[in-house]
Amino acid sequence: MTGRAELVSTISGRKYPFDRIEEFAENGESLEVSLPGLAHARPRSSPHLWERFGDFLPFPGMNPARSLGEGNTPLLPAGRQLHEWTGLPNLLLKNETQNPTWSFKDRGSLTCMFLADFLGERVAATISTGNMGHSLAAYGARAGVKVIVFVPGFAPREKVDAMAIHGATVLRVEAPDYSAMKRHVLGLAGALGVRIVSGNGPVRVEGYKLAAFELYEQMEGRVPDYIAVPTSACGHVRGIFKGYRELREAGLIRSLPRFIVVQARNNNPITGALKRGDEQIVPVTDVRTIAEAMTTGDPPGGEEVLRKARAFGWLGEDATEEEILESQRRLAAAGFFVEPAAATSLAAVRSLVRNRRIDPAATVVLMLTGSGLKDMDVLRHHACGARTSSLSTVASDLRAVLAERTSESPGTLPGH
């Protein structure tokens, strides 16, 4: 920590105290942490990422016991099949499914626990379709913090059960849509005196920017041309960008990556506006998409992302339901089982290459945001299952399998 932190609204620049309990400014603008002295911030030696980049973080003390081993996720070449399918020979996959609760949300949950320690808060609440609730429940259990999770009625059972097993209190909230539910519940924070966080909160953004620092290390200071981020509440893309922006402020890099904001075609308030050239997002109601982790149809902070996209040359692309499922199959066939929301980026970058909006020689990083184990119901859309055999037929069944063609289509799931 290089100086006294405060919160700043991202459009008007209004300042707030760092311990502000409300997640957004009164006018609805997103807030972000402002930390003076970043020009002099430098990485230092430590086994922990957050300690190595402690000069870039607003917490005066960070207890290693709060960690569940998040981060250090692989950055891997996508492999021949995906290189050929997308037309991107320099496609890299940042596999965030290898975080402790199988999604990128763990980075933000860690910083939520650092904040709870700093402010002496023993209750943490969040609004989630699943991943963030699971993550905060696990980190709260580790830290001895009571966790309350508000989920929409459609939240998958496997995600709700994963929250409850850690001892979190889960409240299913029936509402016209997820965005309406989120705005209503967030509005309760000040009156009830409990910090309620969403995916776009300033402290979670501080956790998400750790991915930028990790990419900086993994790429040995080189900056990718593009980073594709599945986007719902906007905090993830804001966080990674903030990390790179602060690395540049510190003089550690000279250029910034361009970001690709990715959404499902059935719920594209941000990418739709970007593709139309609109100044404001148009909220999507009655959202129906297989990418259930991306169901914010009216994201608070969406206008800020539009402004950043215009200022920094970001791209926006969305994927149809069929494209999402095919991308999920393609990734699985290459060894990566991700949930539908995470698969949207693969379809998006392929479309951008085919439409000549990305140079095929560009280095592109896909953020694989969540594991396929988060949403097993999606497998009903794929040809999954086991063949039946017996002791008397297993030898002949094996001969039949070995005799089959091995050159199956690249999009076929293994074993089919």
Image (spheres, rainbow, N blue to C red):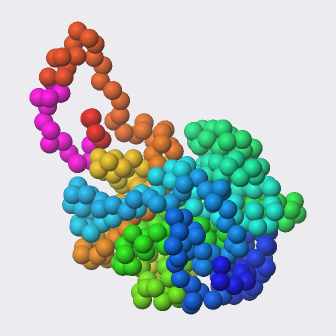
Report if residue 325 is visible in the image.
no
On screen, residue 91 above or below 242:
above
Q: Pinpoint residue 149: horizontal percent, then vertical percent.
A: 71, 50
- Residue 121 in which image quadrant: bottom right
Question: For this view, does 105 lie left or right of residue 98?
Answer: right
- Residue 124 in which image quadrant: bottom right
Name the image quarter holding the N terminus.
Answer: bottom right
Residue 402 counted in the magenta span: yes
On screen, residue 321 above or below 166:
below
Question: For this view, does 286 lie left or right of residue 370?
Answer: right
Helix, strand or loop: magenta stretch:
loop
Name the image quarter holding the C terminus.
Answer: top left
Q: Which residues are magenta?
A: 400-412
Residue 388 counted in the magenta span: no
Q: Closer to the camera, 158 or 212?
A: 212
On screen, residue 183 above or below 293:
below
Identity of the residue furthest to the top in this view: 392
Question: For this view, does 144 lie left or right of residue 132?
Answer: right
Q: Closer to the camera, 96 or 152?
A: 96
- Residue 356 in which image quadrant: bottom left
Q: Pinpoint residue 143: horizontal percent, then vertical percent.
A: 71, 52
Name the residue rendered at 60%, 38% in the picture: 157
On screen, residue 402 above or below 397:
below
Report if residue 64 is visible in the image.
yes
Q: Pinpoint residue 355: horizontal percent, then vertical percent.
A: 29, 72
Name the residue rendered at 24%, 75% in the picture: 361
Q: Pinpoint residue 24: horizontal percent, then vertical percent.
A: 73, 73
Name the residue rendered at 49%, 38% in the picture: 377
Name the residue rendered at 24%, 73% in the picture: 360
User: Could you tell me how many numbered marks the image carries?
Assistant: 0
